């Protein structure tokens, strides 16, 4: 799951259940605030954390991300309405990604749904949506309980994540299914997740157990704590847009500023034939002629800045929304919000310094863009546009 944008103003961010454990292992002591919670940006160094994530196993505090336990006879129908995830098609143990849309098909947030039993689901979103959940549940036998403050959540990522969990005695029952249980009266869950191209597991457990689980992973699992800045590089390499950074939520955007799944390269997360999710009619009516597009670029430079102008054929077509140096490809990887009419493969990016200085950039294929392309090809001959 992707972290949303850092809080612009945070006078007194709250500590997550894992804050003291993370703080005790953080040499850098560099922090930010996400959804009002403290999050470490760097633990030791960005470079070393990134290297371990690519070759070994890292652990991250995922506590600031919103989570809901959704239960009831209509739980699956409720989730299929409030998100684009076809929850009724999920079997116990299955997980799927989707989006939350407004009535016109604008993207409000990302969403992940795991079915833990016949009538119990876990919904995860980068930001909280308490009022939206309450309104969507009207007239339905479904309850969405916000469990964010009741649990501790950590993610273990990397090619050796499974081995690290096994060494710590925390291996989940299956490698491809979610599982749930009760610990001290609190529902717990474990599920396989992907952070970019990295396999991993998310563990959700009572907050009272936070320090014990964290310590066991570090001592016996030999995992390395990772901060937000290293995770940001991995996110950019995977091509996953970040809410509040690469796009503004549709319910907060200025008029005309909302982005559709097509404009964000996420149409595969909102297929028109997947059910009756909120925003489907609007998406069908308004979104099939995108005005903007979010693309991933590799830039031939060591540094770039959000807001930098993007040029194609000597014409300004957009701007950089987020970027970071990638040790894997030895270039800056960046998201760019550009005109939908632009179909170039090669671009130029304005750099700070003398006027008209630019560096070369090209479209960078990511795991997310590959999924989008596969979806586009599968839909090219589709004729079913039923509402």
Image (cartoon, rainbow, N blue to C red):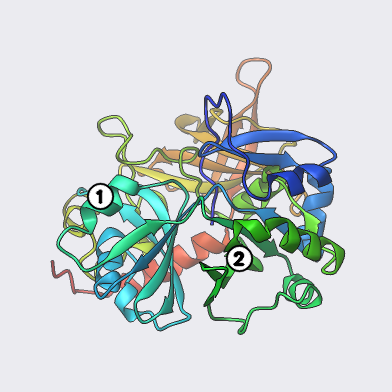
**Label for residue 343?**
none
The image shows residue 130, relative to residue 161, as above or below, that is above
Residue behind mark 1: 289
Q: Residues within 10 Å of mark 1 (few under 14, many from 20)?
A: few
Q: Position of residue 175 (x, y in %)?
A: 62, 82
Q: Is residue 180 above or below residue 319?
A: below
Quadrant housing the C terminus? bottom left
Q: Position of residue 151 (x, y in %)?
A: 55, 57
Q: Which residue is mark 2?
A: 202
Q: Residue at x 82, y 68 (%)?
A: 221
Quarter of the figure with residue 367: bottom right
- In the visual, does 244 lie left or right of 327? left
Q: Identify the mark nearer the N-term, 2 or 1.
A: 2
**Secondary structure of the residue carrying numbered label 2:** strand
Of residues 44 and 21, the one drawn nearer to the viewer in this rendering: 21
Q: Quadrant of the N terminus?
A: bottom right
């Amino acid at each position: 799951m992707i972290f949303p944008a850092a809080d612009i103003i945070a006078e007194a961010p709250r500590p997550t259940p894992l804050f003291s454990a993370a703080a005790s292992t953080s040499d850098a002591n560099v922090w930010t605030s996400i959804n009002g919670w403290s999050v470490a940006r760097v633990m030791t160094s960005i470079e070393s954390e990134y290297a371990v994530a690519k070759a070994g196993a890292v652990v991250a505090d995922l506590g600031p991300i919103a989570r809901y336990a959704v239960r009831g006879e209509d739980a699956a129908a409720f989730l299929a309405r409030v998100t684009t995830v076809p929850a009724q098609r999920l079997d116990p143990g299955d997980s799927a990604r989707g989006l939350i849309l407004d009535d016109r098909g604008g993207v409000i947030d990302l969403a992940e749904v795991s079915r833990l039993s016949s009538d119990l689901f876990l919904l995860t979103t980068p930001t909280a949506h308490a009022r939206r959940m309450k309104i969507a549940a009207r007239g339905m036998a479904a309850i969405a309980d916000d469990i964010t403050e009741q649990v501790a959540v950590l993610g273990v990522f990397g090619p050796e994540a499974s081995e690290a969990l096994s060494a710590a005695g925390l291996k989940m029952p299956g490698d491809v299914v979610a599982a749930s249980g009760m610990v001290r009266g609190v529902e717990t869950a474990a599920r396989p997740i992907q952070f970019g191209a990295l396999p991993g597991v998310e563990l959700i457990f009572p907050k009272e157990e936070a320090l014990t689980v964290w310590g066991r992973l570090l001592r016996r699992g030999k995992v390395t704590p990772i901060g937000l800045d290293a995770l940001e590089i991995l996110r950019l390499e995977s091509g996953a847009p970040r809410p509040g950074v690469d796009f503004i939520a549709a319910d907060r955007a200025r008029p005309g500023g909302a982005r559709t799944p097509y404009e964000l390269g996420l149409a595969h997360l909102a297929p028109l034939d997947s059910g009756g999710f909120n925003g489907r009619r609007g998406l069908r009516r308004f979104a099939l002629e995108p005005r903007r597009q979010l693309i991933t670029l590799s830039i031939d430079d060591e540094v770039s800045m959000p807001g930098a102008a993007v040029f194609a054929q000597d014409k300004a077509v957009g701007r950089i929304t987020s970027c970071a140096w990638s040790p894997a490809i030895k270039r800056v990887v960046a998201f760019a919000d550009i005109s939908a009419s632009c179909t170039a493969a090669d671009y130029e990016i304005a750099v700070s310094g003398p006027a008209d200085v630019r560096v070369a950039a090209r479209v960078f294929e990511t795991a997310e863009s590959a999924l989008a392309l596969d979806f586009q090809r599968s839909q090219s001959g589709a004729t079913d546009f039923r509402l």
